[in-house]
């Protein structure tokens, strides 16, 4: 695997709908880093499974991941609650995690040349995908706040779903993501905790920026 030297690597883990994606995107843009929302890769695989359950075979998934382009991950269909729930199920499968591993590591350590580094968010980024990241954050918010944020996002996308359904789904996803045996979501000792419950997007961004700038001496 090719590893670029002297790049900035930021690793973020978070439970569903904690606002990590929005923050990671803003941080990546500010420091000119390649941004990868790793949840989208699991959503992409989950979408393939929901679309053609009969074609859900290791060989086919492997070739789909091999030819996967970052732009494939921007398909709006990946955002539904149904796909998120299925992603949480298939992500417990060790074979699938192994297939996704290299795709993530390659982009984290060898981002396209025009970027100064990479910023990845997910569930196991701080301890499995980019364990030597320059900055590690664990971004969270309380359950109801997360459910409300996700509910509003889904409403904008005109999805037919109620707040209590979203709440139930996020609770189920948390249970699975925190308790699974393979790559569970956890806050590592060397990750900085950012609780976004009472902070707006700008305040969260500035909090993280201050931490990064101080260490980089900017
Ligand atoms: O972040 P997002 O909610 O899109 O992720 C969907 C699901 O994919 C998560 O609930 C989790 O089970 C799985 N996932 C994972 N490892 C990652 C990112 C996401 O297992 N690095």
Image (cartoon, rainbow, N blue to C red):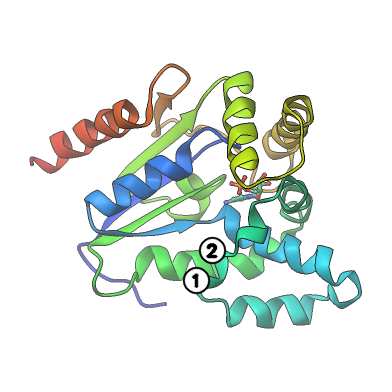
Residue at the left extreme, as displayed: 218
Separation of residues labelled 2 and 1 (CA atoms): 5 Å
Residue at 64% over, 28% down: 147
Position of residue 177 in the picture relative to residue 102 (left or right): right
The part of the image, by quadrant, that contains residue 168 is top right
The part of the image, by quadrant, that contains residue 91 is bottom right
Q: Which residue in the structure is indicated by mark 1?
A: 71
| Vertical arrangement, residue 187 with respect to residue 130, above or below | above
Residue at the right extreme, as displayed: 54
Residue 82 x %, y %:
78, 49
| Vertical arrangement, residue 98 with respect to residue 39, above or below | below
Is label 2 within 8 A of ligand 1 (CB to nearest ligand atom)?
no
- Quadrant containing the C terminus is top left
Residue at 40% over, 26% down: 194
Q: Which residue in the structure is indicated by mark 2?
A: 74
The part of the image, by quadrant, that contains residue 178 is top right
Is label 1 within 8 A of ligand 1 (CB to nearest ligand atom)?
no
Label 1 Cα crowd, 10 Å radius (few <14 / some 14-19 / many 20+) = few
Label 2 Cα crowd, 10 Å radius (few <14 / some 14-19 / many 20+) = few
| Vertical arrangement, residue 55 with respect to residue 93, above or below | below
Residue 134 x %, y %:
29, 47
Q: Are marks 2 and 1 in contact (CB under 8 Å)?
A: yes
Residue at 49% over, 46% down: 127
At mark 2, the secondary structure is helix
Position of residue 195 in the picture relative to residue 26 (left or right): right
Q: Nearer the viewer, residue 192 or 53?
A: 53
Residue 163 x %, y %:
72, 27
């Amino acid at each position: 695997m090719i590893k670029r030297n002297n790049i900035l690597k930021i690793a973020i883990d978070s439970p569903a709908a904690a606002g990590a994606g929005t923050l990671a995107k803003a941080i990546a843009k500010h420091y000119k880093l390649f941004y990868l929302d790793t949840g989208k890769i699991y959503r992409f695989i989950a979408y393939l499974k929901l679309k053609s359950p009969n074609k859900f075979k290791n060989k086919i998934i492997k070739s789909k991941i091999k030819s996967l382009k970052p732009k494939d991950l921007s398909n709006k269909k990946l955002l539904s609650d149904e796909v998120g729930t299925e992603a949480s199920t298939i992500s417990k499968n060790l074979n699938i995690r192994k297939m996704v591993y290299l795709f993530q590591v390659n982009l984290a350590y060898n981002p396209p040349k025009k970027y100064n580094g990479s910023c990845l968010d997910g569930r196991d980024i701080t301890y499995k995908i980019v364990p030597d990241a320059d900055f590690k954050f664990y971004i969270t918010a309380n359950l109801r706040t997360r459910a409300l944020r996700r509910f509003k996002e889904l409403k904008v996308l005109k999805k037919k779903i109620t707040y209590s359904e979203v709440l139930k789904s996020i609770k189920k996803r948390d249970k699975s993501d925190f308790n699974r045996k393979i790559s569970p979501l956890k806050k590592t000792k060397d990750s900085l905790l950012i609780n976004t419950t009472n902070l707006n997007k700008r305040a969260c961004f500035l909090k993280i920026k201050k931490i990064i700038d101080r260490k980089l001496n900017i």
